[in-house]
Amino acid sequence: IMATVPLTPRQIDSLRGIVDGFMPCLSSNTEKESEANNRIWNYRLSQDAAYMDALKLTITSKLNRKDSDDIKMLLSVLSTTIGSMLVTGKVSAQPFSAWETSMQSEALNSLKLSKIALKRGAFSGLKRLFGKELATLGLW
């Protein structure tokens, strides 16, 4: 049995940034919304403990070793400023997890549209992983 190696705090931050980039919260157009409506409009899937735990478990325990190592490597690279710039092509003084959600979404979209097959493959793998967990939890 393969021993599971947990994600580091920096990898988890990158994972949250990717989740936010894929599934940004909705924006309310009015300040007159009730508190309950504002909670719904401003809900971040990256703050859903059950979803994040399911993602972490999948990455560390359910994927084959190569896929798990590839995702962990990508999360590690995105946890650095230089790595974030190299992977996404976006210039910033901060790592991916600290970017505004709109910039994270734009960066993920640029991976999807990249002429570099490895970047498109990274996008596709992440999208499959997140979509699978959303379906498993009944959120998609």
Image (tube, rainbow, N blue to C red):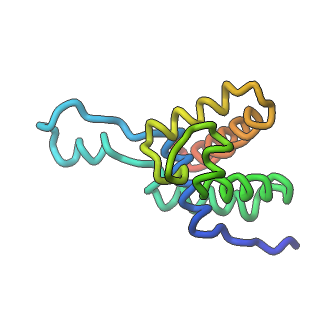
Residue 118, by quadrant, is top right
Q: Nearer the viewer, residue 56 or 111?
A: 111
Residue 114, by quadrant, is top right
- Could you say where residue 22 lies in the image, as x and y percent from the top left? 54, 39
> Residue at left 68%, top 45%?
129
Residue 5, relative to residue 130: is it above or below?
Answer: below
Q: Nearer the viewer, residue 21 or 33?
A: 21
> Residue at left 60%, top 42%?
135
Left or right of 80 on screen, residue 121? right
Which quarter of the rendered picture does the N terminus lie within? bottom right
Q: Nearer the viewer, residue 18 or 86?
A: 86
Residue 69, relative to residue 129: is it above or below?
Answer: below
> Residue at left 17%, top 32%?
30
- Could you say where residue 89 lies in the image, as x and y percent from the top left? 63, 37
> Residue at left 50%, top 50%?
93
Which quarter of the rendered picture does the C terminus lie within? top right
Left or right of 56 on screen, residue 52? left
Left or right of 79 on screen, residue 100? left
